[in-house]
Image (cartoon, helix red, strand yellow):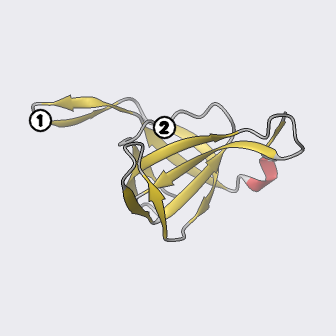
Amino acid sequence: MSRIPGWLLRHRITIEPYRGDSSTGPLYGPPVAVRAFVDEQTRTVRTPGGEETTSSSTAYCVPGVVAPPLSRVTLPSGRTTTVIAALSRDGGGLPTPDHVEIQLQ
């Protein structure tokens, strides 16, 4: 398994994992700073429920980063957004960079 090279992870994002809802709104876990490569490109993606939606940014991180759907993410620009889906990209032993792809609203 080869991980995404550290020199590609030029940005820092902050992930606040979604923990559920309360009577006052969404609950988030403590913020975690993560190295990432952020690509601010608009594209159509599918939610975990199968619906099509628009993603305005994608963050690529090392394997093991946890970002449940609806988690709050702060990008290097200071913009706060929400996780649509976090996908594990594993090459299965092929010489490809294993990583987590976080699709953001």
Residue 22 located left or right of residue 30: left
Q: Which residue is mark 1?
A: 24
Tell which of 81 and 103 is nearer to you: 103
Tell which of 55 and 62 is nearer to you: 55
Residue 38 — which label? none
- Of the 4 image quadrants, the one containing the C terminus is bottom left
Q: Secondary structure at mark 1?
A: loop
Residue 95 x/y as whole percent = 90, 44
Residue 56 located left or right of residue 98: left
Residue 95 located left or right of residue 42: right
Tell which of 85 and 33 is nearer to you: 85
Instruction: Name the image quarter holding residue 63.
Output: top right
Tell me the mark number nearer the camera, choosing from 1 and 2. 2
Residue occupying the far right of the picture: 95
Residue ID at (70%, 56%) = 10
Residue 52 located left or right of residue 32: left
Q: Which residue is mark 2?
A: 67
Mark 1 crowdedness (10 Å alpha carbons): few <14, some 14-19, many ≥20: few
The vertical placement of 15 against 78, above or below, is above
